[in-house]
Amino acid sequence: MILALLAYLNLANVSAAIATNLPVGLLKQAATEIGVNLGNSANELLFEPNNLEFVAGKRYNLHLVNPSPQKHYFTAKDFADGIWTQKVEAGKVEIKGAIHDLELKPGAEAEWVFVPLKPGNYSLRCTIAGHAEAGMTGQIAVN
Ligand SMILES: [Cu+2]
């Protein structure tokens, strides 16, 4: 079912096709929890971990936390273009639909629930001036 979906997506506009063609069963699949810290309490400019791996067709709950004293971005545009976002939850707000990047203020947390669809290697970075250059980058692999 997933392979057929992927084959279809290669021929069609990914984001438009996904919402209507995603198998209902995917949403009943338990989400795999993965945690990523944006920066740390010592205010180092990094993602922890900075190497993320996902399997296409599985459902994930990416728990983003900013334990640092400054704001950071989780930006991975090409990765985000190849996933189906079910929702992003932050505080009492739940956002549905496509998301490209998230800004987390000091102490903020967000949960991004999605299903990767497009295998590939993608880059992750914080887009605050100077942060990526200082090492706030990462790799995302979808197998
Ligand atoms: Cu940053």
Image (spheres, rainbow, N blue to C red):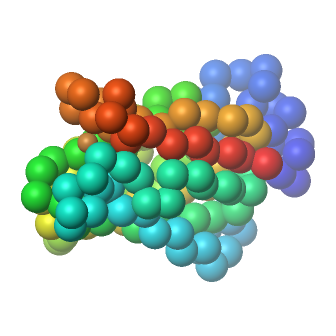
- Residue at point 41% right, 67% down? 63
Relative placement, left or right, of 68 versus 26 is left
In the image as oriented, which residue stretches furthest toward the bottom?
A: 30
Relative placement, left or right, of 47 versus 102 is right
- Residue 132, by quadrant, is top left
Mark yes or no: residue 75 visible.
no
Residue 77 at x, y percent in the picture: 47, 30
Relative placement, left or right, of 54 versus 134 is right
Name the one closer to the observer, 141 or 117: 141
Mark yes or no: residue 52 visible.
yes
Residue 87 at x, y percent in the picture: 40, 57
- Residue at point 75% right, 31% down? 9
- Residue at point 57% right, 65% down? 60
Name the one closer to the observer, 136 or 62: 136
Position of residue 84 relative to residue 25, above or below, is above
Relative placement, left or right, of 40 versus 34 is left
Position of residue 21 relative to residue 58, above or below, is above
Residue 18 at x, y percent in the picture: 62, 40
Name the one closer to the observer, 99 or 40: 40
Position of residue 117 relative to residue 76, above or below, is below
Tell me which image quadrant ligand 1 sits in: top left
- Residue at point 63% right, 79% down? 30
